[in-house]
Image (spheres, rainbow, N blue to C red):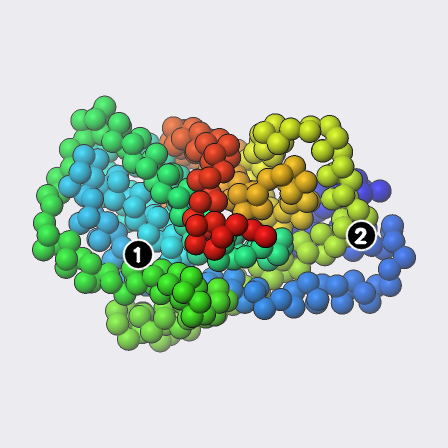
Amino acid sequence: MELIVLVVFFGLTLISVPVGVSLFLAAFCGFVWFTDIPLMMIGQAMFLKLDKFSLLCVLFFVLAGNLMTSGVIAKKIVEFAEALVGHFKAGMAIAAIVSCALFGAVSGSALATLAAIGGLMVPALRKQGASENFSVGLLTSSSILGIIVPPSIPMILYCLVTDNSIARMFLSGFIPAIFIVFALCLYAIYTARRDGTISETTYSTRTLWESFKSGIWGLLMPLIIFGGIFSGVFTATEAAVIAAVYAYFVELCIYRKLSPREICRITIDSGVTIGVLLIITAGSLLMSEFLTYMQIPNQITEWTVATLNNKLFFLLVVNVMLLVLGTFIEIIAGILIMAPILYPVAIAMGVDPIHFGLILILNLGVGYITPPIGVNCFLAASMFDRPLSKVFRAVLPTLLIMFLSILILTYIPTLTTFFPEMIMGPIK
């Protein structure tokens, strides 16, 4: 009977019904066909699932990210990154990677990071002499840092579904993000030496100081967020509200590049984005409620523990499954659908909940650049006016780096859990 519900969901998705509506209709059919629950309780279940204070955290971070993506924050971050590392071998490429990481701490989104940083850095790399394949592939892949560097919207949603600490989840992303930045920088340096690309930027303390002063308002935002959360001054949800107010203040009063009309448009567009997100969340949580009512997670847990009986093999299977899933489903829907199913299994297998959250997010995020339906690749093809097949070929080298990074981060959990346990102590 549960298979029928899944067939309904995938059938609706294949005929282009929005994911959130597909989830709702499939779960609704499941409740009507296979349970005796009154229909009124379905609506009550959706309301109760959405009636969570922590969900506001997602909404306000979306607003803050959209404000800073549309303003001049991205340009200021790029200028600072160029002044900081642009003089190194492959300096412009390293600056592009660092810019994606820094902007990820502002936007929390892979697509927003590619849209904001890619449009600035790909032409700069091409001007320096880097090949088109290298430039497009590097920026398309580096944008994944937008969902690994805290504050990350997927991290918040994972914690919302699994009832884990958002602050602890944020802390888990720092070392993995640095690890991936380092891996991509090594690739950039190797490519620069192979192709003979020379950085034309020279180091200047004055330029670095000027770029820092100019971009200080954007660079301060992550410090305010994390400083407030980890010092106990405010919660993660309150931090999201402060981030949104701070974004309004910086764009309207400091940089003043956006008119009040544009600010209103961005706010309205953010409301539309948030509305779509809430529909997906409601549908996903209702599907989760149906699966829980039918005891599907318990059955999967029992079967997995009895069949696999090996944590390492289980993690490998999960990685492969999530990578495949991430190629054709958006990361938010992927987390909301898969986390309730896989989380109990992971806990039963002895996997740290925070470590599992990072594995889930990283795999679904890499799905953004994995053929045949990598969402970031479609955006890159549109942005840089290149055939999709060429974009897929361009990301292959960095995709291999991402796969290797996933394996290392999966099987060395200390890289993920070190900061959370050092600052907040072990999970009790």
x then y, percent, for residue 25: 75, 54
Circle 1 sits on which residue?
A: 74
Left or right relative to 280: residue 232: left
**For discs 2 and 1, the disc positioned in front in the rendered view:** 2
Circle 2 sits on which residue?
A: 293
Secondary element type, mark 2: helix
x then y, percent, for residue 407: 48, 31
Residue at point 71% right, 52% down?
Answer: 288
Residue at point 59% right, 52% down?
Answer: 428
Question: Mark on residue 322?
Answer: none
Residue type at mark 2: give it: Tyr
Vertical order, 113 against 190 (above or below): below
x then y, percent, for residue 383: 37, 46
Which is more toward the observer, 130 or 424?
Answer: 424
Left or right relative to 55: residue 37: right
Residues at discs 2 and 1 in contact (Cβ within 8 Å): no
Which is more toward the observer, 33 or 411?
Answer: 411
Vertical order, 115 against 186 (above or below): below
